[in-house]
Amino acid sequence: MTAKLVFLGRLEDVAGMGELVVGPGPLEAVLAALEPALAVQLLGERVRMALNGQLIAEGGGIVLADGDELAFLPPVSGG
Amino acid sequence: MADVRLLGEAFSAMDELAVFTAAHPEAGGLVSFLGQVRQEGGAHAVEALELKHYAAMTLPGMTALAAATEARWRLDGLLILHRYGVMYPGDPIVLVAAAAPHRRDAFAAADFAMDHLKSQSWFWKREKTARGWRWIEPRPDDHRDLARW
């Protein structure tokens, strides 16, 4: 029973890793178990979240289930 | 049907355009844009550029962008190629080409696709200069460009 957090862009540097396997459960509890400095960055106003590849409006009320992948997406820059 | 690819290896823009052009003899006009890693001098010169993507979203997002572009203009064909990984000055990053019965549609479609690739697609860019690696945030210009559509 595991879920996965994915850190994109500069958040990968902040986290020191691209992915982190976590236990399922409410997002609040998952974040509370992380380094506070990382959790603050993940909850930044300009960071968006995608659950299993789909953007979500906000993290409130999210409960990670077995196999879920939650990605943290800072502002993009392509081209 | 658009040709949309997310590439981990270098590509030849000239070869890709030759194939695309040959595939659309019915088109009256073809517009292309090639973005490449800038070669510059001085202390702030970019030595390398890295683009990261997210497998769950980047290519699906590019495919949706291609569909939106094709729905908005009358096109005979659309090509969208985008690199990820580490690139060096002179390396191609992105190639967009639109083939259309008439030039206005081809110009507009390529412009629209590029503006959205720059600031609305799932890529994260960092540059290496003499001072090390630095993440690049979108510029205000990028958002202004997007607001045109």
Image (cartoon, grey):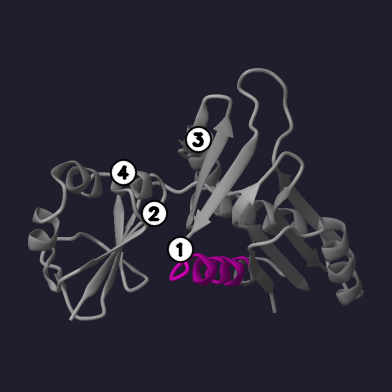
Q: Which residue lies under the disc numbered 3? A: B133
> Disc 4 and disc 3: Cα gap in Å?
14 Å
Q: Which residue lies under the disc numbered 4? A: A14
> Disc 1 and disc 4: Cα gap in Å?
17 Å
> Disc 1 and disc 3: Cα gap in Å?
20 Å
Chain under disc 3: B
Q: Amino acid at mark 2?
A: Leu
Chain under disc 2: A
| Rendering coords of residue B60 (x, y %) | 51, 72
Specify the principal SS of the magenta part: helix
The residue sitting at 87% across, 70% down in the picture is B19
Q: Amino acid at mark 1?
A: Tyr
Read off the magenta span. Answer: B55-69
Q: Is residue B134 visible?
A: yes
Q: Marks 3 and 1: in contact by CB < 8 Å?
A: no
Q: Which residue lies under the disc numbered 2? A: A8
Q: Nearer the viewer, mark 4 or mark 2?
A: 4
* Location of residue A59 by image quarter: bottom left
Q: Amino acid at mark 3?
A: Trp
Q: Residues within 10 Å of mark 1 (few under 14, many from 20)?
A: some
User: Considering only vertical position in the picture, is B69 above or below B125?
Assistant: below
Say the numbered circle drawn on residue B142: none
Q: Is residue B75 visible?
A: no
Q: Nearer the viewer, mark 2 or mark 3?
A: 3
Q: Marks 4 and 1: in contact by CB < 8 Å?
A: no
Q: Secondary structure at mark 3?
A: strand
Name the residue nearer the viewer: A23 or B54: A23
| Rendering coords of residue B83 (x, y %) | 64, 57
- A13 horizontally vs B87: left or right: left
The residue sitting at 51% across, 38% down in the picture is B144
